[in-house]
Amino acid sequence: MTEQAVAEDWVTRLADEVVAEAQARGIENIVCASGISPSGPIHLGNFRELITPHLVADEIKRRGIACEHILSWDDFDRFRRVPKNLAGVDDSWEAHVGKPLTSVPAPHGSPHANWAEHFKAPLLEAMEATGIEVREISQTEQYRAGAYREQILLAMRERAAIDKVLAQYRTLEAEADARQRATGKGKRQDPRRQKQATLTEEQAAAATEAERGSGAATEDDGSEGSAGYFPFKPFCSVCGTDFTTVTAWSGDSGDGSHLLTYQCTKCGHTEQVDLDTFTNGKLVWKVDWPMRWAYEHVLFEPSGVDHQSPGSSFVVGKDLAPLFGWERPIGPMYAFVGIAGMAKMSSSKGGVPIPNDALDVMEPQVLRWLYARRRPNQSFDVAFGPELQRLYDEWDALVRKVAAGPEGGAQPGDLAAYLRSTSVATAGGLRELPTTPRPMPFRTIASVIDVTQGDEAQAVRILSELEPDNPVTSIDDLRPRLDCAERWMLGYVPAEDRTVVRSEPDTELLAGLDDEQRESLSLLVERLEEHWSLDGLTHLVYGVPKVQRGLDPSAKVKDPELSRAQRAFFVLVYRLLVSKDTGPRLPTLLLAVGADRTRRLLGH
């Protein structure tokens, strides 16, 4: 494949580390892994679990080195709780708590076969849109096909060693708790609670909701039974749940049998099963994860903060992976991904946004850029409020710098993030992600959509007038950015923040104008026609107060008094057009309102 050099950034450094590890261990095909539990909406924090290995694998492929990115669907995980306020779900789903996710019905009205498939589908759509390619692995299919039979039997043979490792961490945690109770010092906090202490109320709510799907980090480690430690958890053959306790095991008898007896505490069923053939159960999470590292030969897999706290699965996995003949992979901890503007989102959106929600308002490159430009341990917010317009401004500025070449001033790290956001490595070479042919400023498009109340034909007409020398010839040239701006303005901006142009002049306000205000409006109206373009109107509205003070309208003047006059002039025009002190950028608003209507509303 074609190689493309990318300047050093966090992705480059992690790829260097992974390649060096592969060379040291004599591994030819590098495996980067993601693991996601489809236990509910797969939110933008989960997306970091997916895109971080993708970016590292992509960098390795750019170097011409064999690398595979696998996505392990933890769809054989237990259904832990019924999510609140989830469409199509009611209290009857309580009966399915404890079952594998693939054995839980999908929400009412879903076209998918089960709960897991219902929540996988939107992420798969987002992956396709953002150019993320993986080899999918269903843990339900793996366990039920008996793929891990040897590993399960090995874990049962080594259960004393596994229990000893886990006991060390249980002891450390117990000692820390006891020390805190005795001295009041050294209080151990859940890292998620520490994190939330620094978040806004809105972000903390998002964090709590988002982390409801990551409960595998704190599930039973196999030590709850009274018959000893067992790392295998069967699902009951009668009620289908994992409210089971192992009561007997023949594997220690020396006769070569692997008979396991369990009792279900939910329905009372007792059964003896043969692990040489039984496939309706799984290893507990803290054993399952390191087992799969070994099975898939994983060299790189990041994880969230809940998996890297003391005694958690990633930490314990370092000691358990060698039992399966492997070493814990390189795995940076990734930080919280918050939401900006969620509180103002349309109530129909509900819950914590998922990648598809972001792609409703962001071009795929912009979403990739959000994750590529920051190290995994850096927290950031995904913007759904007014900040989204600034994000597009920053992206467009970067695109211009890159397009200008060496003279553009793009820093090496910014250039690297740009390349990772706009292209992906494939077997046939680099593939550019589709982009908007005519990427007009997002805030301009959104303002026009706002003023035209979503009338797409009218919006396109106005947008075509923004650059008379280079008019838009096809609406497709504005997509997908036009669609993103339309969905954002109509679906995410609260009604009270929308712009409504007056239907009739404000006669009371016009009657009360002083001479200076009347003069400013006359200067604006008289020069509208000759300045009827985005650049022309920008020059005009800032120039009117200058002309009133005898200045050249093109002069660059730093004068607090002039700035106040310009602000007062803007407020006056906004009040006459939209009955507010502020609104869309004034040049864009004038274009959207139209010259004739503007003259009428300004009293001319």
Image: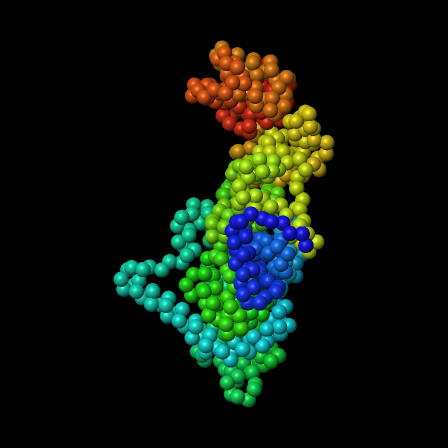
Lateral position of residue 151 relative to residue 197, left or right: right
Looking at the image, is 361 positioned above or below residue 296?
Answer: above
Quarter that holds the N terminus: bottom right
Q: Would residue 156 be found to the left or right of residue 441 on screen?
A: left
Q: Where is residue 96 in the image (x, y as percent from the top left)?
A: 56, 65
Tell me the residue at 50%/82% (across/down). Answer: 248
- 49 or 66, which lies in front? 66
Picture coordinates of residue 4, whole percent (x, y): 63, 49
Numbered label tally? 0
Residue under the image location 37 percent in, 70 percent down: 171
Q: Can you say whether 430 is above or below 441 in the image?
A: below
Q: In which quarter of the image is residue 120?
A: bottom right
Residue at 47%, 73% in the rendered image: 222
Task: Say whether residue 365 is visible.
Answer: yes
Residue 596 coordinates in the image, percent (x, y): 64, 18
Q: In this view, does 539 lie above or below 304?
A: above
- Give 371 or 80, whichever is nearer the viewer: 371
In the depicted view, which residue is nearer to us: 546 or 44? 546
Asked if residue 600 shows in the view, the reply is: no
Q: Which of the 4 quarters of the picture holds residue 58? A: bottom right
Asked if 282 appears above or below 591 in the picture, the reply is below
